[in-house]
Amino acid sequence: MKLYKFLLILLLSVFLKSNSQEILTKDKAINLALDHNYGIKIANNKTEIAKNNASLYNTKYLPTISASTGINYGNNYSDNTLQNGTIISTDNAEQNNYNASIALKYTLFDGFGRLYNYKRLKESHQISELDVRGIIENTILNVFTKYFEIARLTQNEITLKQSLEISKQRLKRVSYSFEYGQNTKLEVLNAEVDVNNDSISYINIKRQLANAKRDLNLILGTDITATFNVETNVLFLENLLLDDILNESILNNVNILKAESNIALGNYDIKINNAGWFPTINLNSSYGFTNFNNDITYLYDQQKSKNISAGLSLSWNIFDSGTTKTRVQNAKISLENLSILREELIQELKRNVLNAWEIYQNNLFIFNAEETNLNTNKRNFERSQEFYKLGQITSIQFRQAQVNLLNAENNFNKAKFEAKIAEIILLQLSGKLLYISF
C-alpha cells in the first residue's frame, strides 16, 4: 500500500510539471531541424564548396597575371694582364641593379574544354544541392518519426494515467468491501497487484517518453535536456491517388533528379575529352625594365633597359598514341552505364511507391478498424463499470474490461501514427515532402 501511494504522488508531481512545458508544434520542429541539424549544416557547407568550385575563378576563363621584381648588389675585384705584360687591376668595383616585370598569359582556345568543364562544375553544384535536399527530406522524415512516436507515447501516458486512477478506485472499493466482509482478501491483493503493475507501466512509459524527446532534440540540434510537449492531432491528406504519386515521383524524386544530373555530367565528360582533338592557342604578353648603377670603374655610369613583348602560340598534339580516343570511348561507356542506372532507379522507385502505397492503404484500414474496436471497447467498459458498481460482475471481470480498453486505446494510437508515417514516406518518394504543410 505504501509503495503504490508513493508512486502515485511521484507520478502526479511529474505530470503537473509536464503540463507546464512548451508546446513544440510540427512546423517549429521542422524549422529547428532545418536551422540546427548537424547533417544539414555539413551538407550546406559542402554545397558552398561546390558553389565555389563552379565559380568563374575556377574555370581558366580569366587570364593569369604575374609580377616579379628584384635588386642586386655586386663588388668585383679583378687583375687583367695584357699581352705586353701590363697588369690592370680593378678593386672594389661596385655595381647595383634593380628590375621589375609583369606578364600576362591567356588561353584563347582550348578545344572548348574549359567551356564544358565550367558547365560540368555548374551541374556538380546542382547535384550537391540535390544532396542537401535528400538529407533535408530524410531529416524531416526522422523528425516526424520521432515526433509522432512522442505523440503516441504521450497519449499512451494519458491512457495509463487514467487506467491507474481506475485501478486506484477499484482498490479502494474492494478494500472497503473487505472491511465490511463483502469479499475476500484475495480480491484486495489482486487489486493491489494491478495498481502496482499499472504504476510500473506508467513509470516505464514516462521513461520511454523522456528518451524519445532526447532523441528528437538530437535531430533538431537543440539542447538534449530541453523538455516540451507535442501536438497529438493527426490529419490525413485527401485525394491521394496512386497514379499521381507514380508520375510525380518520376519527375521530382531526388534520386531520379540526381541520376539525370549524372547523365548530364557524362555528356560533359565526353565533350571535355573531345577537346584533346583540337589545338590550343595561348596569348602571352610581358613588360619589364632593368636599371644598372655602376661606379667609376665601369664604362657606363648607368644602364637602363625596357622591353615589351606579346605573342601568340599554337600547340597541337597531332597524335597522342590514342590516349584521347581511349578517354572518349570510356566516357561514352560510362554515359551508357549512367543511363542504365537511371532506368534501374526508375524501376526501383516504382516498386517502392507501390509497396509504400500498399502499406499506407493497409495502415489506413487498420486505423479505421482500431477506431471501431476502440469505440466498442469504450462502450463495453462503460457497461462493465456500471455492472461492477451494481455488483453484477466480479472485480476480475471488471479488470479484464479495463485491460481490453487500455489495449484498444494503445492499438488505436499506434495505428494512427503508423498510418501518418506511411503517408509521409509516400510524399517523400513523390518528391512533395518539402512542399506539404503538416
Image: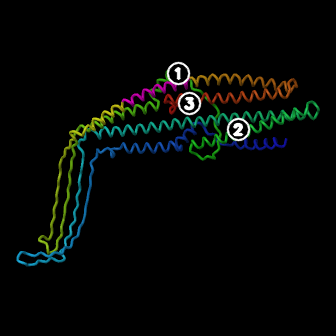
Q: Which quadrant, please, contains the C terminus?
A: top right
Disc 3, SS: helix
Q: Position of residue 272 (x, y in %)?
A: 30, 37
Q: Amino acid at mark 1?
A: Leu
* x 58%, y 25%: residue: 360
Q: Quadrant of residue 28?
A: top right
> In terms of depth relative to the viewer, which is nearer, 262 or 371?
262
C-alpha gap between disc 1 and disc 2:
37 Å
Query: Residue under circle 3?
Result: 424
Asked if the residues shown at circle 1 and circle 2 are in contact, with their CB atoms under 8 angstroms apart, the answer is no
Q: Residue furthest front?
A: 321
- The single residue placed furthest to the left in the displayed view is 84
- Depth check, mark 3 against mark 2: the one in front is 2
Q: Residues within 10 Å of mark 1 (few under 14, many from 20)?
A: few
Q: Quadrant of the N terminus?
A: top right
Does 98 sit above or below residue 390? below
Overall secondary structure of the magenta stretch? Answer: helix
Which of 402/83 is in front? Answer: 83
The boundaries of the magenta stretch are 336-357
159 and 3: which one is in front?
Answer: 3
Protein image colouring: rainbow
What residue did someone put label 2 on? 205
Q: At x 61% / y 23%, what residue is drawn?
A: 362
Q: Count the numbered circles shown.
A: 3
Q: Nearer the viewer, mark 1 or mark 2?
A: 2
Residue 267, image quadrant: top left
Residue marked by disc 1:
241
x, y percentage for residue 59?
32, 44
